[in-house]
Amino acid sequence: MATSPNSMADALARMWARFLPEIMQRLRLVEEASQALTCGALTDETRAAAHAAAHKLAGSLGTFGLHRGTSLARQAELLLAELPSSTDDATALAGWVFELRELVIKHNA
């Protein structure tokens, strides 16, 4: 039995609605790490939580057609895998987080 494009779109929309709270929570964790890095207060615990969240975002956003989001989350994941400390790291992470939030909001509209 073939699935129509409309039923696939409906199924993806239902999945998006179901997973949106998790996506937003993961985004918040990465945002918190970004803010902490900017303030020079990034702890290992916050970095590790944000790294895991970015990894999960990178793995899931493409499912919903947000391929740019996957790329941004992957960049954040790679930066958070190490001990970011420079102003350049903080600026880059803040930019990626801002763009990620915009993509998710736009997709949700």
Image (cartoon, rainbow, N blue to C red):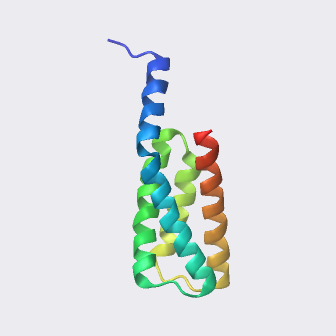
Picture layout, residue 64 above or below residue 22: above
Residue at horizontal 54%, vertical 82%? 84
Q: Residue at x 54, y 87 (%)?
A: 41
Asked whether, in this view, residue 23 is left or right of residue 72, the answer is left
Residue 58 seen in the current view: no
Residue 71, quarter of the rendered image: bottom right
Is 14 placed above or below 103 here? Answer: above
The residue sitting at 55% across, 64% down in the picture is 75
- Residue sitting farthest toward the left: 1
Q: Quadrant of the N terminus?
A: top left
| Residue 87 seen in render | yes
Q: Position of residue 109 (x, y in %)?
A: 62, 38
| Number of on-image labels | 0
Please state the horizontal and vertical placement of residue 17, each as a whole percent of the image.
Answer: 46, 39
Would residue 83 appear left or right of 100 to someone viewing this image? left
From this view, report whether residue 61 is shown above or below residue 95: above
Identify which residue is drawn at 42% across, 28% down. 11
Left or right: 81, with 90 as reference point: left
